[in-house]
Image (spheres, helix red, strand yellow):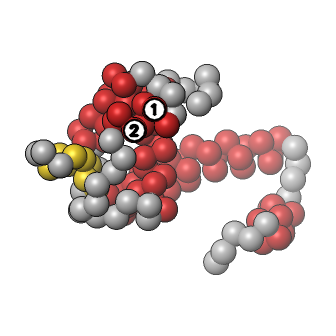
Amino acid sequence: MNDSQPIYTQVMEIVENGIISGVWGEGELIISTTQISRLYNVNPTTAVKAISRLTDDGLLYKRPGIGMCVAEGAREKLLTRRKADFLGGALDGFLAEARTLNISTEHLIKLIKERGIHD
């Protein structure tokens, strides 16, 4: 965990990354809030808050007596949101800094290709 963002948002990101990467597929149980608090050494209330937010976002749903599961379409929803955030925020900042440093578009493209970004 780091100090750059609230712990519950970091926990949310860990779960989101698991959904995106396929650790947890649609309808599958995710790690419990007790397991989250132990594994990442966070307060159980923090783990509950993170999972509640993901449920409120429609990414998880509760199966009574069983646990929290990945909602249908959660991966696609996350990918869409993260791509929009990246293209609207991180990429704009990246390009602004490249302009400030007088890095050419051609040089940026070359670096991206060298580092394995796929077409």
Residue 111, compared with residue 36, is above or below; it is: below
Q: Which mark is residue 38?
A: 1
Who is closer to the viewer here, 105 or 115? Answer: 115
Disc 2 residue type (three-letter): Gln
Q: Residues within 10 Å of mark 2 (few under 14, many from 20)?
A: some
Q: Which mark is residue 35?
A: 2
Who is closer to the viewer here, 10 or 115? Answer: 10
Disc 1 residue type (three-letter): Arg
Query: Element at badge 1?
Result: helix
Kindly indicate the quadrant of the structure image that contains residue 54: top left
| In this rendering, position of residue 27 left or right of residue 22 | left
Residue 61, compared with residue 2, is above or below; it is: below
Q: Residues within 10 Å of mark 1 (few under 14, many from 20)?
A: few
Q: Residue at the spot x=59%, y=30% of the render?
A: 1
Residue 80: percent from left, percent from top: 41, 58
Label 1 to label 2: alpha-carbon separation: 5 Å
Residue 84 appears anywhere in the view:
no
Residue 6: percent from left, percent from top: 49, 24
Residue 107: percent from left, percent from top: 86, 63
Residue 71 appears anywhere in the view:
yes
